[in-house]
């Protein structure tokens, strides 16, 4: 019998391959192709349009880093909006914080949620079991556009890459609508691609420029994700005034009493200590100029014009 390998190309001449024990399920929805596999090393994993979303072995890394960083910066977060996140892992992690009162989760493809509830209860376990979660199947773009001003403390954009269903979640207009939907201490975290391979780094720079054109504080932080392209992956951190390092309150965060496998205060600080090549990519591509408005000098990003 021939071995069955799943392969994801990270560059034209580089790929990650996993030996598959069994393909569990496959379906083409109106939005994307969904596949579930089982493997020896990574356990079960699922893909969207041929790209790995999560595996049983390493999903905790992504989900702890998207949720714990903003909760440490503002431990008073109570109302959370998740855009995407159909596997349920981000909602699961947010609901570990007992002070959170409301989690609105907007996923465009209901089949992702239903299939993860069947094949990935590890991540989807909270979706039908925590009364704080309002599960909404629809367009995240329109939901944010229609959201009341200042409705949320935190928006988590747990999206796929900027292709297909996830493409609209990387636009300046979307970030502006997120800004409006956040309150004065609001924080936005978005899936921010990788700095390593050329095509991923290009999308990273584009996303960063757009966030910097909308939010007064916009930076990125890093984490190690073994099954993502290069293993070096980023989240974007944007806020109306809270600094992710200076304003982090680790004493109050520790009072949540969470037993994490990846995130801790040291990891938090180290995540924002970016390697030189990443700093250079971001610094060289985000141009600013100073203009005068009355007696005030204002720093404006040129990327205001990027859509």
Image: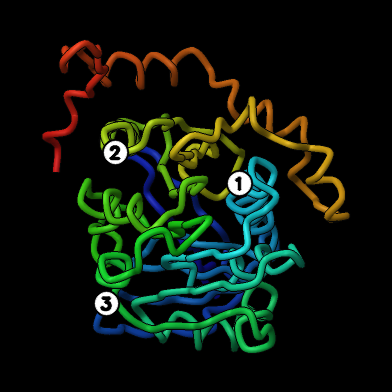
Asked if residue 165 lies left or right of residue 195, the reply is left
Question: Where in the figure is residue 92, as x and y percent of width and height?
Answer: 66, 70
Q: Which of the marked residues, 3 or 1, is nearer the chain's N terminus?
A: 3
Question: Where in the figure is residue 242, as x and y percent of width and height?
Answer: 54, 35
Q: Where, quadrant-wise, is the C terminus in this rendering?
A: top left
Mark 3 and mark 1: span between their CA atoms?
30 Å
Is 182 rendered above or below residue 135?
above
Q: Looking at the image, which is closer to me, 172 or 192?
A: 172
Mark 3 and mark 2: span between their CA atoms?
29 Å
The dot on residue 268 is none
Q: Residue at x 85, y 46 (%)?
A: 254
Is 21 rendered above or below residue 261?
below
Give the secondary structure at mark 3: loop
Mark 1 and mark 2: span between their CA atoms?
18 Å
Give the secondary structure at mark 2: helix
The dot on residue 31 is 3
Asked if residue 78 lies left or right of residue 258, the reply is left
Q: Residue at x 36, y 37 (%)?
A: 215
Location of mark 1 (residue): 70
> Crowding near pointer 3: few (<14 within 10 Å), some, many (20+)?
some
Q: Residue at x 68, y 27 (%)?
A: 269
Q: Residue at x 62, y 63 (%)?
A: 78
Q: Looking at the image, which is closer to me, 192 or 154?
A: 154
> Crowding near pointer 1: few (<14 within 10 Å), some, many (20+)?
many
The dot on residue 214 is 2
Question: Where in the figure is residue 233, as x and y percent of width and height?
Answer: 50, 39
> Crowding near pointer 2: few (<14 within 10 Å), some, many (20+)?
many
Q: Where, quadrant-wise, is the N terminus in this rendering?
A: bottom right
Colour scheme employed for the rendering of this structure: rainbow
């Amino acid at each position: 019998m021939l071995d069955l390998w799943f392969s994801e190309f990270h560059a034209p001449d580089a790929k990650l391959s996993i030996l598959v024990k069994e393909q569990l399920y496959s379906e083409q929805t109106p939005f994307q192709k969904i596949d579930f596999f089982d493997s020896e090393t990574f356990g079960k994993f699922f893909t969207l349009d041929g790209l790995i979303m999560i595996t049983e072995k390493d999903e905790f890394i992504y989900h702890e880093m998207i949720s714990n960083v903003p909760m440490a910066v503002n431990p008073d977060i109570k109302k959370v909006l998740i855009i995407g996140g159909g596997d349920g892992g981000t909602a699961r992690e947010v609901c570990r914080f007992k002070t959170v009162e409301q989690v609105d989760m907007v996923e465009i493809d209901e089949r992702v949620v239903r299939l993860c509830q069947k094949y990935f209860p590890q991540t989807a376990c909270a979706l039908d079991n925590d009364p704080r979660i309002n599960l909404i199947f629809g367009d995240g773009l329109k939901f944010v556009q229609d959201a009341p001003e200042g409705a949320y403390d935190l928006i988590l954009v747990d999206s796929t890459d900027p292709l297909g269903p996830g493409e609209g979640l990387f636009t300046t207009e979307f970030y502006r609508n997120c800004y409006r939907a956040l309150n004065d201490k609001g924080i936005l975290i978005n899936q921010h691609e990788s700095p390593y391979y050329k095509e991923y780094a290009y999308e990273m720079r584009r996303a960063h420029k757009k966030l910097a054109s909308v939010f007064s504080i916009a930076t990125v932080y890093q984490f190690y994700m073994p099954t993502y392209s290069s293993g070096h992956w980023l989240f974007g951190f944007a806020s109306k005034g809270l600094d992710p390092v200076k304003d982090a309150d680790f004493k109050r965060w520790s009072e949540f009493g969470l037993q994490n496998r990846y995130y801790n205060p040291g990891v938090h600080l180290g995540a924002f200590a970016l390697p030189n090549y990443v700093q250079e990519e971001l610094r060289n591509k985000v141009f600013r100029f100073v203009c005068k408005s009355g007696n005030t000098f204002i720093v404006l990003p040129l990327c205001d014009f990027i859509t």
